Image (cartoon, coloured by chain):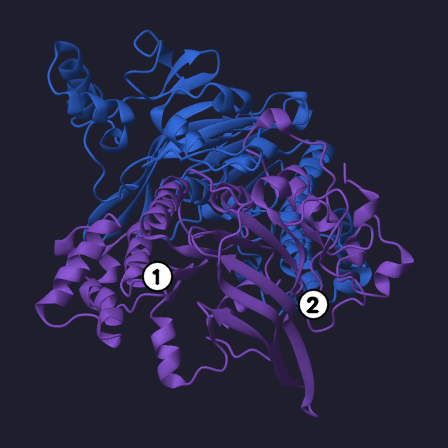
Chain colours: A purple, B blue
């Protein structure tokens, strides 16, 4: 993969601003309301033809954020501008026109395909819904799409169960491409796949990006995959972004203690580099009752009294490039987990 | 040797025919050693583990051949003499129930479905302790609290009264490990013990398993698809593909000089966190379905070597190699290359691996 020079600014295609997505649920006999702050004030810029990675552990809100940006989950507040138009205030028909250009690829290649539809019908659906082609032309388009993702055009009449996991993920990709989108949210697209299949799908997504000029929001928990695939990376913890930087910079010089801990925890397929890790204690706290101040402070080896009082802003720091921002009170102290 | 698996073969009868999920697999694990069995979905790694525990649902499954020898520790056996090993596949069910949990324990990938949701975690651990160690209720409870403490659960005297749903994923996996350890097993079989966990918690569980191995000297069989976890934990590795072991060696060797094209392909197709790389290497095609394993070497349709030679088309050398990898029938009709030692403790099953022709059968 040729990595684009991220220092040159391109037009931003998607601009999410201070997104908050809260879920409420009633619990107990008195039906008292609990608020889960799944996404709590996230801003994200996705430039044209670039891939922004979103990493974090389960429950950090990365999937909710992806779906909120596509308006599949209503936001509590904030705004998203896609290609110059406001997504949250768009009416039904405007939203439908917009959705043609923003698509989603799911993690689970089994659950995301209707088992009663042929793959021809599955891939044709966006073409029909958005009125892109008619009659015989539809089948021709579907055949081209299937070939493009490495399947055979004559597979149109088969059903999803006749395909392996990797092939089903290819079908999901063909469906996402059917309406000629500009922007695709890839939600853990390779996590459910075998190692030998994972690399095939990553290469396919990377070819499509070059060829069609796509922008991706790439949601993943596997840091190695993110490092390989993304131009910039944002790390989420409990509903907020704690660090954001161009990929190479983030991996070379992580400044947030959580990012450092994540990088250290990831197993490396090289037995000569075994051991000597500083392992984080505890687990991600519940978003129903998040810790005060910086949500990471109960697990942070460097936590100071101020960390439990106020939430640190996500801002650039001295000595870091202007595209590298960190939300940590101690980011200027250059502390490193070793 | 603590446990020796010889020529294990397990089949499943399906509507479409008989699937040989594990086909003549042999390996051994020593006391204090972590053996990783690594492979992709459908390669037979979990079926191997379930066969050793005799937990294969029958029907549709059945173990059709092989032996699983559990050796007693020399000197510890009664009178200090070396007792003969027992074959777990041929002992009666009653005796197997005594072995399971007490001498050989197993932990699973999904702690939520492996734990009983309507029993407190304490009661579940106590059940195993009372059954195998014959302690009274009070002593068994004290022992359960001890175990929870050992696996790093905070406030164990409180947690012992919790139900599984009250615990986080990482805590549940710790409870599973505590249950597995409750009777001081000689061997622990861990089937994807960290797969369902987040990276920071995964690192904690890996650390815990390594510590417990050091403290107890138990042998561990680690079933996993994650080569990163293998590199972090294992002493030795068996790589499985399509029901067979295609390569076995110590961990260092597997990662630094893999000999089988499948192992090489897997290692090269991994994106790396410790370096940036251009395009990922790809193993083309898909993992074969156990009902339709290819003839000859089961990996040949995806193998770089055979694909390259077939594309070249012609030449005596390529015809000879192709003949061998695709059609050679030395061990049985349509048979694949057997696992042979090409150097000390490095076995490989590939006609074209250096030293394979002169190699001996693996021990």
Residue denoted by label 2: A286
Check the picture and name the quadrant holding the N terminus of chain B. Answer: top right
- In the rendered view, tell whether residue B312 sits above or below residue A99: above
On the image, numbered disc 1 is attached to which residue? A110
- Most distant residue in the top direction: B358
Quadrant the C terminus of chain B occupies: top left
Decide if residue B360 is on the left or right side of residue B164.
Answer: left
Residue at 69% across / 42% down in the picture?
B208
Are labels 2 and 1 on one chain?
Answer: yes
Chain to which mark 2 belongs: A
Provide the chain ID for the residue under circle 1. Answer: A
Q: Position of residue A241 (x, y in %)?
A: 65, 59
SS label for mark 1: loop
Q: How many neighbours does mark 2 have within 10 angstroms: few (below 14), some (14-19), or many (20 or more)?
A: some
Residue pushed farthest left?
A136
Which of marks 1 and 2 precedes in the sequence? 1
- Considering every residue shown, the one lying at the far bottom of the view is A30
On screen, residue A216 versus residue B339, left or right, reads right
Residue A249 position, x and y percent, is: 62, 41
Horizontal side of B237 relative to B155 (left or right) equals: left
Which element is circle 2 on?
Answer: loop
The part of the image, by quadrant, that contains residue A122 is bottom left
Q: Residue at position x 71%, y 35% from top?
A: B216
- Tell me the residue at 60%/80% (across/down): A76
Could you tell me residue A272's position as x and y percent?
61, 24
Instruction: Give the image location of residue A310, x and y in percent.
Output: 83, 65
């Amino acid at each position: 993969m040729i990595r684009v020079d991220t220092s040159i600014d391109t037009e931003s295609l998607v601009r999410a601003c201070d997104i908050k997505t809260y879920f409420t649920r009633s619990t107990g006999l008195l039906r008292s309301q609990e608020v889960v702050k799944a996404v709590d004030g996230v801003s994200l810029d996705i430039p044209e033809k670039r891939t922004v990675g979103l990493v974090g552990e389960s429950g950090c809100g990365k999937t909710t954020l992806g779906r909120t940006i596509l308006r599949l989950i209503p936001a509590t507040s904030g705004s998203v501008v896609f290609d110059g138009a406001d997504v949250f205030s768009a009416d039904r028909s405007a939203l439908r026109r917009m959705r043609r250009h923003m698509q989603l690829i799911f993690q689970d290649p089994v659950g995301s395909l209707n088992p009663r539809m042929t793959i021809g019908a599955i891939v044709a659906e966006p073409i029909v819904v958005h009125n892109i082609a008619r009659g015989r032309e539809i089948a021709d388009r579907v055949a081209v799409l299937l070939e493009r993702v490495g399947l055979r055009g004559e597979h149109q009449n088969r059903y999803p169960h006749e395909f392996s996991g990797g092939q089903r993920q290819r079908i999901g990709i063909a469906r996402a491409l059917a309406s000629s989108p500009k922007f695709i949210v890839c939600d853990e697209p390779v996590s459910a796949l075998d190692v030998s299949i994972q690399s095939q799908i990553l290469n396919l997504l990377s070819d499509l990006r070059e060829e069609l000029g796509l922008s991706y929001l790439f949601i993943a928990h596997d840091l190695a995959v993110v490092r390989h695939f993304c131009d910039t990376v944002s790390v989420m913890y409990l509903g907020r972004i704690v660090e954001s930087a161009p990929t190479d910079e983030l991996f070379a010089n992580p400044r947030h203690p959580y990012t450092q801990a994540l990088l250290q925890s990831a197993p490396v397929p090289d037995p000569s580099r075994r051991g000597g890790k500083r392992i984080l204690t505890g687990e991600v706290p519940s978003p129903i009752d998040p810790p005060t101040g910086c949500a990471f402070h109960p697990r942070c080896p460097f936590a100071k009294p101020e960390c439990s009082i106020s939430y640190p802003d996500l801002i650039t720091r001295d000595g870091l490039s202007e595209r590298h921002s960190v939300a940590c009170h101690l980011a200027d102290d250059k502390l490193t987990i070793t | 040797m603590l446990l020796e698996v010889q020529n294990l073969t397990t089949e499943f009868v399906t509507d479409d025919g008989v699937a040989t999920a594990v086909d003549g697999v042999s390996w051994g694990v020593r006391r204090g050693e972590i053996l990783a069995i690594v492979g992709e979905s459908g390669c037979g790694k979990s079926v191997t583990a379930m066969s050793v525990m005799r937990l294969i649902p029958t029907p549709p499954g059945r173990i059709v051949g092989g032996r699983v020898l559990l050796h007693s520790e020399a000197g510890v056996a009664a009178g200090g003499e070396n007792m003969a090993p027992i074959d777990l596949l041929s002992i009666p069910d009653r005796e197997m129930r005594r072995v399971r949990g007490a001498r050989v324990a197993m932990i699973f990938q999904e702690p939520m479905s492996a734990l009983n949701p309507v029993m407190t975690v304490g009661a579940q651990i106590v059940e195993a302790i009372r059954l195998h160690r014959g302690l009274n209720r009070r002593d068994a409870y004290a022992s359960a609290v001890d175990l929870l403490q050992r696996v790093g659960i905070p406030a164990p005297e409180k947690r012992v009264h919790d139900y599984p749903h009250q615990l986080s994923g990482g805590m549940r996996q710790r409870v599973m490990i505590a249950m597995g350890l409750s009777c001081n097993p000689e061997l622990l079989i861990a089937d994807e013990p960290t797969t369902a966990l987040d990276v920071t918690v995964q690192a904690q569980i890996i650390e815990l398993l390594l510590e417990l191995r050091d403290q107890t000297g138990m042998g561990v069989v680690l079933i996993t698809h994650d080569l990163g976890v293998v590199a972090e934990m294992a002493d030795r590795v068996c790589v499985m593909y399509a029901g067979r072991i295609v390569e076995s060696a110590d961990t260092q060797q597997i990662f630094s000089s893999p000999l089988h094209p499948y192992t090489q392909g897997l290692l090269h197709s991994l994106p790396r966190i410790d370096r940036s790389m251009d395009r990922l290497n790809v193993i083309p095609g898909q993992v074969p379905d156990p009902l339709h394993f290819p003839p000859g070497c089961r990996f040949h349709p995806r193998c770089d070597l055979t694909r390259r030679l077939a594309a070249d088309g012609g030449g005596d050398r390529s015809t000879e190699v192709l003949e061998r990898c695709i059609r050679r029938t030395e061990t049985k009709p349509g048979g694949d290359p057997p696992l042979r030692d090409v150097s000390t403790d490095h076995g490989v099953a590939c006609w074209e691996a250096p030293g394979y022709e002169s190699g001996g059968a693996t021990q």
